[in-house]
Image: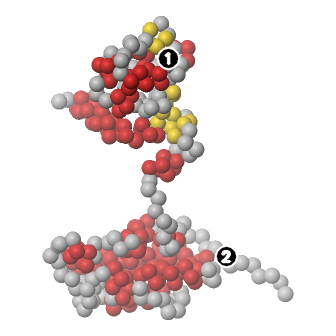
Amino acid sequence: MTQESGHQSATIRSMLQLRPVLKEYMYCHIGNGENAAFWFNNWTSIGPLLEFEGQGGPRAMRVRKGAKVIDATRQESWFLPPTRSDQIQMIQAEITTIQPPNASHGPNQFLWRKSDGTFGPVFSSKVTWEYLRVPSPTVYWHKVVWFKEYIPRNSFMAWLALLRKMPTRDRLRRWGMDVPSVCELCSTSSETHHHLFFECEYSSTLWQAFASQIWTNPPNDLHSAASWILQLSRQSNANAIRLIKLIFQASIYLLWKERNARIFTAVSTPPRIIHHAPDRLLRDRLISIKATPPPAQSPL
């Protein structure tokens, strides 16, 4: 098989995979009918005709499977042979409500579904995504993870940790994997999300060293820390809020990185050394952020 034919085959496979999506979100408004597939495109109110009628449709209607819409016309009128099938009669009744293709109508228009459910010429990835996705309830801690100045890799790890979706050893053991249960950082307790962030003595040292410089008494619990940040955010300036969120995420990222380094490379870093990593990480990020000036005080 040549490279060109292989590329064409891949394109066809991609189109077949997209077809279930396209039939819901793309509609073909018939103009000249020349490049619209009679059986496959969504150009009637009942959707793609092949899905409605099945594989026997082309034979029953005497319209070949690869036909274009224009092929079902004669002298600028629909040419649909009579049939005894109720299903085919329903298709024909639907087709006759559509103006027959004509060269004077211009090319066909492929329209995308809009937010109000109708179709228009402009594709919106946002609208299509809103139709495709299954919305979930908003979590209370989302503002701790997603904010304007976040560091992508750090926020991603924080998001996974708060969802309890990281492959900690307790999860791996529940999946049936034969791995040790003990925490790699402290070697005293079982490794879970809440132990690793920040109940473990090693992780607590890192988290407390930085978070306590912004606000006193940071909790040594992952979700409690997120709630603590949100609560104090209502009474602090924007710069402090931004900094504590970055510290929270950087701590999660660096602890997970250190944990993996110990498991996969047998190399460990003492707490006093690893403390330099968030310092450098935060400095690099804060340099690129324009500080928010404090609110002006009214004169006495």
Q: Residue at x 32, y 19 (%)?
A: 60
Q: Residue at x 52, y 48 (%)?
A: 127
- Foreground residue, 185 or 167? 167
The image quarter containing residue 223 is bottom left
Pointer 1 local density, CA inside 10 Å: few below 14, some 14–19, many at least 20:
many
Disc 1, SS: loop
- Foreground residue, 280 or 151? 151
The answer to whether any part of residue 107 appears in the image is no
Relative to 21, say whether 12 is above or below.
above
Disc 2, SS: loop
Q: Quadrant of the N terminus?
A: top left
Q: Position of residue 165 (x, y in %)?
A: 34, 70
In the image, taking residue 13 as reference, residue 132 lies left or right, namely right
Q: Quadrant of the C terminus?
A: bottom right
Residue extending furthest toward the top? 75
Q: Position of residue 291 (x, y in %)?
A: 61, 73
Residue at which label 1 appears? 101
Pointer 2 local density, CA inside 10 Å: few below 14, some 14–19, many at least 20:
few
Q: Residue at x 25, y 92 (%)?
A: 188
Amino acid type shown at disc 2: Pro
Relative to 293, say whether 118 is above or below.
above
Q: Position of residue 281 (x, y in %)?
A: 43, 75
The answer to whether any part of residue 297 appears in the image is yes
In the image, taking residue 159 as reference, residue 217 lies left or right, namely right
Residue at which label 2 appears? 293
| For marks 2 and 1 on the same chain, the one whose residue lies earlier in the sequence | 1
- Foreground residue, 193 or 134? 134
In the image, taking residue 3 as reference, residue 91 lies left or right, namely right
Viewer-nearest of discs 2 and 1: 1
Amino acid type shown at disc 1: Pro
